[in-house]
Amino acid sequence: MKKTLITLLFVFMLSSPSGVAYCAEISAEQHVHNFYQWYITVASTQSPPLGDDAVYQYVNHCVVQNIKIFYARSYFDADYFTNSQDIWKGMLDVLVIHEATKVDETTSIVPISFKWAEDIQQHMVVFVQNEQGNWRITKVASTDFFH
């Protein structure tokens, strides 16, 4: 009976909509790293890849739609995810993913940096939320206004 109860509890945790099993497999930091690896690779050869359905594996659907609208209205003067006007594959060499800060049970903030040189760095924060067992980026913000 005890063994059955433990097995049922384990199965329940794996199928939990809170994403317990997924979060145990991939961290918020790893999700952000995977996104930037994909995004910079694709964006370095074409315009921001928001038309690629793969973006929805990484970014919240509504956020993607809003960014598309902002781009169409020329709201941004730089790329939303890199805060850079040009994107090239070499950006992956200077990308640093820092330790996430957990906000609550479903939300974390992952600081990232593009470390061009010791005294030339660009810092941003990436907000990620667990949506039904999968991390999704919900916001990217530059920290430049803090300096």
Image (cartoon, rainbow, N blue to C red):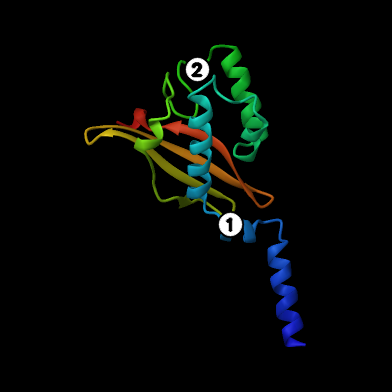
Residue 123 rendering spot, x and y as whole percentages: 36, 35
Locate residue 29 relative to residue 65 in the image: left or right. Answer: left
Q: Secondary structure at mark 2?
A: loop
Q: Residue at x 22, y 36 (%)?
A: 118
User: Seen from this angle, which residue lies furthest top?
Assistant: 73
Q: Earlier in the sequence, mark 2 or mark 1?
A: 1
* Quarter in which the C terminus is drawn: top left
Label 1: few (<14), some (14–19) or many (≥20) C-alpha neighbours in 10 Å: some
Residue at the spot 59% in from the left edge and 45% down from the top edge: 129
29 and 139: which is toward the camera? 29
Q: Looking at the picture, does residue 61 appear above or below residue 22?
A: above
The three-letter code of the residue at mark 2 reads Phe
Q: Residue beneath label 2, please? A: 76
Instruction: Note whether 76 is above or below 90 in the view shown.
Output: above
Name the mark on residue 130.
none
Locate residue 132, reporting x and y percent: 69, 50
* Mark 1, residue position: 23
Q: Going by the image, does 5 lie left or right of 118?
A: right
Of badges 2 and 1, nearer the viewer stands: 1
Residue 124 lies left or right of residue 59; in this view the side is: left
Place of residue 66 in the rendered image (x, y in percent of width and height, measured from the top left): 63, 24
Residue flagged by tag 1: what amino acid is it?
Cys
**Which residue corresponds to the image point at 54% horizontal and 20% vertical from the top-left?**
46
Q: For the residues marked 2 and 1, what is the alpha-carbon distance in whole angstroms?
A: 32 Å
Extreme residue toward the bottom, this view: 1
